[in-house]
Image (cartoon, coloured by chain):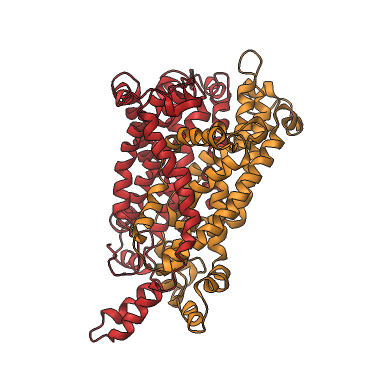
Amino acid sequence: MSAPLDLTPAASKDSVIRPRRNGNSRNTEVTRLLPRSLLISVTAFLCAIVLIPMLYIVLASLNTDVGVANGELIPSTFTAENYSKIWTTVRLGNGLANSLLVAGTTAVVCATLSVSTAYVLVRFTFKGRLGILRGLLAMQSIPGTLMVLPVFVLFSSAATYLGVTIIGTHWGLFLTYLTFALPFSTWVMVTYLRGLPKELEEAARIDGASSMGILFRIIIPLSWPGIVVSGIFAFLLGWNDVLFASVITRPDTQTAAVALQIFGAATEGGAVPPYGQMMAAALVCAAPVVILYLIFQRYLVGGLTAGGVK
Amino acid sequence: MTLTPHKSRTADNKAPRAAPGTDRGRERRRKGVTERNRPLWLLTPGGLLMVLVIVLPALIGIFISLIDLDQYTLRDWLSAPFIGLDNYIEALTASPLLYSVWLSVSYSLIATIVTIPLGVAAAVVTQNKFRGRGLVRSIFLIPYVLPSFVVASVWRTMFQPDGVINTTLAQVGIDGGLWLNGPQSYATLVLVQIWASWPFIYLLALSGLQAVDHEVHEASAIDGALWWNKLRYVIFPYLKGPLSLAFLLSILHHINNFTLPFVLFGVPAPADVAVLPFLTYVTSFQSFRFGLSAAMAFVSLVLVAIPLFIYLRAVKLDTTDDPGGKK
């Protein structure tokens, strides 16, 4: 068990240490919760709920726009054209590049800030520490819709009063995503650092290491899994956001999330919207996120339950 | 109901303190380490960001809610007419706000209550090893992994009047009707939300199931408990904590969810799905009643505050017993 983010290390560690008296099959029999037939039918039902729409998306992305609009489940003509057309119908490539840039930078900076913040919060005592910890949790629940208008007004005022353009630049999105990602990422790091043994740090301190030396030489090298998880969450926040992206961007700085909406809205009156292309583009937008999850699944699932936030 | 039931090393430090006859000098030294050389300046970048993007806008938001701000006065918002609490009065008496509150609360509750049995069922079936369990677990996480805007775009396409759902329903002789407009849109919103969010409950339920000791399974096997009795009286009590947490967090998430209704239905919002975040957004960026919208946002904050308060009370913030640290 190398995942300190797991919610139940206590229970699972015990069961690893304790020698199992029974064979594996016996164990399964004892811990069995449902009769076999029920187990199979429930699993099949849940998988169907998930897989049927997924299968449809893949089929629709290989269908013509008209075919999707007419509600064909199985395409009458299979075509991969959608995957080449999406790049010209809407500036999806531009959107993806912007999303990668903004979400990627957010992830790196957020991970760096969250590990240092969490280090101070976990290893030192000072006045207001519990207030900050509580604030980290509370801030995860601030509705974005509450903040979007004032943030917009503030950023536009920066142009009027200070001559700094933020609206429509990558900076606006970056600052916003960074701030909204930071509480959750820091909380993930706080739970992670609590699981790290203190002895190494104490030894380093006796050897004369400073607090910063400990952070760079001990904490950061030991907490890569946590740092990766908090970075990924920051990335996902940026990648998945629609609210701020639709208010404080210009066509040039549009993210993939906004670009995808254009497929549906472009030809709303009259002609059939390019639904087939939209499905293909949806899969393309989902791909980076799915790949990230597949690579880091083990860590991410623990991190999700530790922070308990979608 | 704690987030971090680790038996961490920090907790072990308590032991010498609690023991009778503790060496007082040692205790003082240990305290000193956490209070000397504190690199508190590391908190400043995060703190500055919080001030710039959360505190300052929150104050601006309060100010905006007290002025009459529209697209003409926006450029020079500091000199817009001050109208006191008029926006709040209008929001509460002459706007669809209260209906939106009802929509938000009822939709959050329905979606959460339906997802809990689904999530628990998913956790129960994947608790035991079987061939292909890894694959099934990955499948269960798909709706969770997909970005909200992708989920909403896809369902929007499927729910079109001539879309795949209605054509499929027509084949079995059911008239699907309009899913994205009119009263049925509420059902659409709830359905899609359920599809997208049950894996979250599944994750938390799974973490609860993993806390059940092997002895508990053995004991109930020796007692010859039937499977439903075992589930009901032995296993489910273990899930109470994780599920209450899941319940609260789901409600919070659904009440704050903007992306799903926004992408699913687009603007202008159908009246039947104008949930709070949607209504706030539309009032700002469609009707350009910025002051009114800010007032609505603050009223909706009260709604979020209730589950949030319960959540904060329940979460154990700290595992060390610091001087002055309240649990």
Q: Nearer the viewer, residue A47 or A99?
A: A99
Q: Residue at x 47, y 19 (%)?
A: B181
Q: Is residue A229 above or below residue A148?
A: below
Q: Residue B107, how many percent across, how many down?
A: 37, 32
Please indicate, yes or no, whether residue B254 appears anywhere in the rendered image: no
Asked whether the viewer can see residue B270, the reply is yes
Residue B139 or residue A232, whichever sits in front: A232
Chain in red, by letter, is B
Percent across and percent down for residue A56 are 61, 33
Q: Residue furthest left?
A: B20
Q: Residue B173: x, y in percent?
A: 50, 19
Residue A306: x and y, percent? 43, 57
Number of marks in picture: 0
Q: In the shown orientation, is residue A81 left or right of residue A117? A: right
- In terms of depth relative to the viewer, which is nearer, B137 or A2? A2
Chain letter, colour orange: A
Residue situated in front as seen by the camera: B189 or B327: B327
Image quadrant in which you'd find residue B236: bottom left
Compared across the picture, whether A201 is left or right of B98 comes to right
> Along the horizontal axis of the image, is A253 left or right of B134?
right
Image quadrant where residue B226 sits:
bottom left
Q: Residue at x 42, y 58 (%)?
A: B207
Q: Image point 72% across, 31% down: which residue?
A: A86
Q: Is residue B99 left or right of residue A118?
A: left
Question: Eyeballing the image, is A281 above or below A119?
Answer: above
Residue at 49% from the left image edge and 42% from the top image edge: A45
